[in-house]
Amino acid sequence: MDSKTRAIAHEFLPYFRAYRDGHVERFFGSHKVPASMDSSNAVFSKDVVIVPEKGVSARIFIPSAAIKTNQKLPLLVYYHGGGFFMGSPFCSTYHNYVGSLSAKANVIVVSVDYRLAPEHLVPAAYEDSWAALTWVAYPFNINGHGYEAWLNDHADFARVFLAGDSAGGNIVHNMAFQVSFQDLNGIQLAGICLVQPYFGRNDEVVDKCWVFVCPNTSGYNDVRINPAADSRLMSLRCPRVLVCVAEKDNLRDRGLLYYETLKNCGWAGEIEIVETEGEDHVFHLFNPDSEKAVALMDKLASFLNQDNVF
């Protein structure tokens, strides 16, 4: 049976299609570009394995100038988007964007590769994302004896941030929330950035993408997809949050809901929202040199380099 006659279970064209027989076609994020230690680049990158038995890995970026100094840089853990069913830190789109962010903000970035649905349904993505975060925060990292030399020698563990776009923004919230209730080897998050985050809404049927990746969801009251339904939201243990939305994005209102709910729930931190006019979902990934994409990256870089206030 060819692809024209197979029954389709889910599709997100032009990027993804899954069939009921288990066959999956990914048209975005599957092509891997190599990491680079080219001395002519502003950023070095390399790949690391985090959980070999599950295939959890990451690509680490570091400004090349930092290798030659003893300077300690902020550390950003980045989670890619793709609806939980596509995307990769190793594809050219994310490799180029995250590398550029590392150079612009002068930060070390650990860009996480988590398992994807439908081969690995939610909560696999959250489990892998947490495994990567605990790998980064391995206690001996702080004393210079961790898993990764770049982190040992150059990461400032007093300035650890999380960021992600779309489904990655969803993961960022869920990881930060988990840090609020589960010790991360003594590390406190300095801030989180949610770029056009993928959330649900109150009293609304969750969309087909979420049901596809998480068929056992409880619906709109599932706090993983709808943080606004979580009565514990005020317990988020993170001092600063940046939410970025785009005017024409169909997820815009969900990002606004997250912002308004967190701002008004009694949470003690500082939150800011930035809206890009006239742009659609993840515009900055597919047109990174545009004026508005550059402005968004400038905002992220500024957030990652502020001490305690916006």
Image: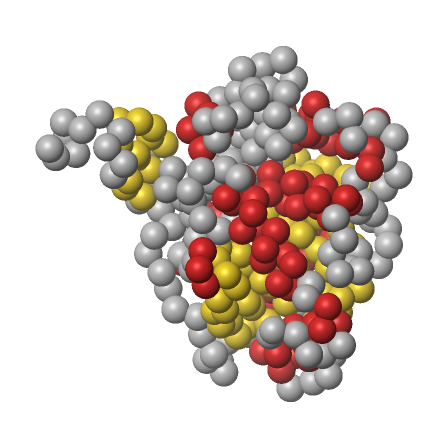
Q: Is residue 125 left or right of residue 12?
A: right
Which image quadrant for residue 148? Answer: bottom right
Percent x, y for residue 219? 56, 20
Residue 131 in sight here: yes
Horizontal relation, residue 17 to residue 161: left or right: left
Q: Is residue 141 above or below residue 257?
A: below
Say if 224 sits above or below 289 in the image.
Answer: above
Expressed as whole percent of the image width and height from the top left, the position of residue 152 reads 68, 76
**What residue lies at 83% left-to-right and 47% top-to-bottom?**
239
Lateral position of residue 121 relative to residue 177, left or right: left
Whether residue 291 appears in this view of the structure is: no
Rendered location of residue 3, percent (x, y): 16, 34
The quadrant holding residue 5 is top left
Q: Residue at x 59, y 55 (%)?
A: 131
Instruction: Report the residue that reaches farthest toward the front.
Output: 53
Question: Where is the N terminus found, in terms of image quarters?
Answer: top left
